[in-house]
Amino acid sequence: MKSKHQTPPPPTNTIQSPTIFQKVMFWTLLPSILLIPLWLFAGRTLFGGPSGWGGITYMFTICPALFLCHLLIFLVCLCKNRRCGKGCSATYHVSYPLAMALVMYDTTLFLQQFVMNDGGDTGPSGSWASHHLGLSVAVSTKMDALLTICIFFLLFVIMFLTFTMELEGDYGVGQEALMAPLVAEEHKVDGEEDSVVKDSSSTLGVHSTEENVSQVEICFV
């Protein structure tokens, strides 16, 4: 008997491969371990900005903390990708929300150096924006404070997303894993139908045998 059971439609929550953007943002985590602390230390001087005690203060306070934070972020993301069983490093990636947070974080860090006020023994020396764009020191200071707050907030968000990030398994096997319960259920139903057919055939065979025996007895009588 032909099975009337139809294969159910595939699940809607199918696994999607990571985008190139997610892969690229994963590999930016490794150089950022050194580049971001160095940028915070002397990024403004690369574009002709003032230098002073601010950079030296950052070098012994914020820069080491950022180095450890970015090292931890990279190691956690690397472990999460390896734990998912990906056989090739080309598939390493971060979640899309984490990738977007990293872009906003890097952009804020880049802009902050242009409005960061510095100074030395002779007093405040202003920022790159105050020297090259004519921005007042007061406005530059407020923008520096606002961007600094955004940097620390985004860093907190990145740390949170890093530790709560859940990556799917191997994308070549993920769809099969989703379909496995459906295939197993289909085989189960087909097996039950085959059992019913066999039982019916056996019952019909018994009835036929009983009828034949009855007919033979009648003939003898």
Image (spheres, grey):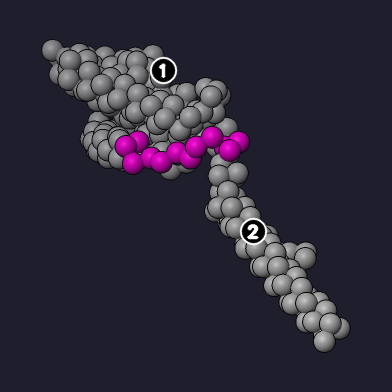
Dot 2 corresponds to which residue?
Answer: 191
Q: Measured from the top left, where is residue 10 in percent x and y?
A: 63, 56
Q: Are marks 2 and 1 in contact (CB under 8 Å)?
A: no
**Mark 1 Cα-neighbour bin, 10 Å: few <14, some 14–19, many ≥20:** few
Kind of residue at disc 2: Gly
* Left or right of 183 in this view: 83: left
Q: Nearer the viewer, residue 204 or 80?
A: 204
Q: Quadrant of residue 30?
A: top left
Q: Secondary structure at mark 2?
A: helix
Residue placed farthest to the right in the image? 219
Query: Looking at the picture, does residue 180 appear above or below residue 93?
Result: below
Find numbered disc 1 in the image and state the secondary structure of the residue it sits on.
helix
Q: Residues within 10 Å of mark 2 (few under 14, many from 20)?
A: few
What residue is drawn where x is 77% and y is 65%?
A: 1
Q: Which residue is mark 1?
A: 31
Which residue is depicted at the point 55% across and 23% down? 88
Kind of residue at badge 1: Pro
**In the rendered structure, which segment of residues is drawn in magenta?**
162-173
Examine the rendered structure and indicate whether residue 191 appears above or below residue 86. Answer: below
Mark 2 or mark 1: whose residue is earlier in sequence? 1
Along the line of sight, the residue nearer the viewer: 62 or 177: 177
Question: Residue at point 38% right, 40% down?
Answer: 165
The span from disc 2 to disc 1 (Cα, nearest Å) is: 57 Å
Q: Is residue 171 above or below residue 91?
A: below
* Residue 215 in view of the camera: no
Query: Which numbered dot is residue 151?
Result: none
Q: Nearer the viewer, residue 41 or 165?
A: 165
75 sits to left or right of 122? right
Q: Is residue 169 magenta?
A: yes
